Image: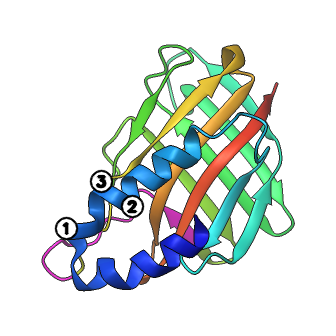
Amino acid sequence: MVRLAAVLVPALRARPSASLALLTALAVAALWAPAGASGEIKVRTLDGDVLARFRSLTCGIKRSAGPGKGFTAKARAGAWKLTIRVYRFKGYHRYLIDYGADGNADFFATKGSRTYSNIAKPKTESEPELTVGGSIQFRKGGRKLLIGFPIAYRVDSFQRQVSVVGAAPCKS
């Protein structure tokens, strides 16, 4: 799949709308791989190089009002940090992750001053969105979190992108 994505990315840049459905389908296929297939959430360059592997997450739910309300998952892998949030958490099912800061879910993959996130939304006139977003979903009653976001932009530079895809166990 990584090799196929490496071939598709240049095609996407030339004709984003033509390959959009195929790239989104690849990300969804990665999510539906057997639960034990990867056992980790990977941050990868669009060329397929793995930047970080998150093998487990610390997860929790805060139901009271105020900042931090909802579901939060956090993980570290060396110098990398991953934070995933669902604001209006209504159980362990699927939540869409949209581009922009006004959705119900977001994530941040950070190493030093580099942060990749779904909140980074390029202006579609100058830099087209290459996908429609992604999703978070749960298996095993919330003991496993799956995330699929095929193209996440760097917050300070829309020229740099990564994918955040995989599944990892949630620990309390």
Q: Quadrant of residue 130?
A: bottom left
Does 167 lie within the magenta span? no
Viewed as shown, does residue 13 lie left or right of 89? left
The residue under the point 72% across, 72% down is: 50
Given residues 57 and 29, the one toward you in this image is 29
Question: What label does residue 23 carry, if any?
Answer: 2
- Amino acid carrying label 2: it is Leu
- Amino acid carrying label 3: it is Val
Viewed as shown, does residue 168 lie left or right of 122? right
Q: Which residue lies furthest to the right in this view?
A: 78
- x, y percentage for residue 98? 34, 47
Name the residue that disc number 1 marks: 17
Instruction: Describe the element under mark 3 as helix, strand or loop.
Output: loop
- x, y percentage for residue 15? 21, 79
Residue stretch rendered in magenta on the structure: 115-126
Mark 1 or mark 3: name the one nearer the start of the chain: 1
